[in-house]
Image (cartoon, rainbow, N blue to C red):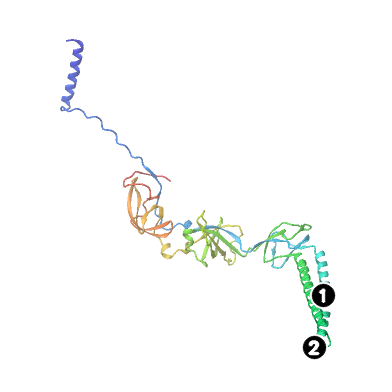
Amino acid sequence: MTKTTLKAAVVVAAVVAGAACGGGKATPPAASAQVVQKPVGVRAVAPAPKLEASVLQATGNVRARQEATLSAEGTGPLTRIAVDVGDAVKKGQVLAQLDTTNARLAVNQAKASRAAADAALEGAKTEVERARTLAQSGSLAKASLDKAEVGYRQAQAQAEQTAAALATAQEALRDATLTAPFDGVITSRSRNEGDYVTPGTAVFGLVNPHALEVRAPVPEALVDRVKVGTLVKGALNPSGAPFEAKVRSLGAVIDPQTRTVEVLADVVPAKGEGPLLRAGALVELDFSGTLAADEAQAGLFLPSQAVNARGQQGFVWVVQDGKAQRRDVKVERVLPGYVRVVQGLGLQERVVADASLPLQNGTALQVVQ
């Protein structure tokens, strides 16, 4: 037997022996490894036993209902500045004085013209009355009476014209004095004694710190529950000092960018030593009092996005042992954006925050923050 034939025989013998040991059956090929499903990343939320306070709050700013920039109404140099920034003033109080020399001269001239016109009117009146008497007795021609009547009307017009000129001169004299239009505090002063001003030149800023209002952009989901006259609680930011405000008006339009409606509320004066509110301060308004009793009571609350629902029937995806489990629930809406779960869910369970995800029962989940 040759060397090559001997090797072939050995190989055949080995194959036969292997078949005998395996019961005459060939060894099957190794099974392919199963594909491991990659977990789906999701956010999870837990049902809340009550609505968060932030859901029912709106951030606003305080502003004065009475605030003005006081400008000069006359022309000339300022001869006196009577107040400074921070001074409290009363309505009608003199704040500044312009030079009145020319204004007084104009008033005196107008008075003299008015006196002359009044005297001429008296003479014309006497003349026309005499002419009327003579005309009635036939002693005066009609042309002469007509002339007297015209003279009287001209004297009346002249008297009225001079009266108007006097009023204008007196008004110009009053304009030389700048007074406070309401009680308040001086917040700015932009001119000094000696400065030359003209009508429209800003001189002072004035604000009434006792007539304050809060302007708050309220989400459209909440604003329909706010009524004019509603008393809401507020807190000064950042101190947290409490105060109250009464809703005065609701905006007629919704801001297309922020989806909010402007709400104006008058700050209720504090009794005793209340918090010091200043125009420009940031505050938080709490509208939880606008909820009905059944809406404010305890329950299991979820964001609407976490529930796939039509009407009261729906479902959520519960995270259980790292997998998704569909759970049928019964819900009721308490606020746009939030629902109360009344059946089918426990307080300790965690729910996928977005019910619109393409999940199935048993889908592997990875909860991310």
Which residue is rendered at x = 35% and y = 50% of the image? 317
Q: Residue furthest bottom?
A: 137
> Residue 131's quadrant in the figure?
bottom right
Q: Are marks 2 and 1 in contact (CB under 8 Å)?
A: no
Q: Secondary structure at mark 2?
A: helix
Is 6 located above or below residue 122 in the figure?
above
Residue 335: percent from left, percent from top: 43, 59
**Residue toward you, 271 or 128:** 128
Residue in front for this viewpoint, 256 or 216: 256
The answer to whether residue 147 is visible is: yes
Q: Position of residue 31 (x, y in %)?
A: 26, 32
Q: Amino acid at mark 1?
A: Ala
| Distance between the alpha carbons at the discs numbered 2 and 1 | 28 Å
Mark number for residue 117? 1
Asked which secondary structure carries label 1, the reply is helix
Q: Amino acid at mark 2?
A: Gln
Q: Which mark is residue 136?
A: 2
- Residue 201 circle label: none
Q: Earlier in the sequence, mark 2 or mark 1?
A: 1
| Rendered position, 290 above or below 305 | below
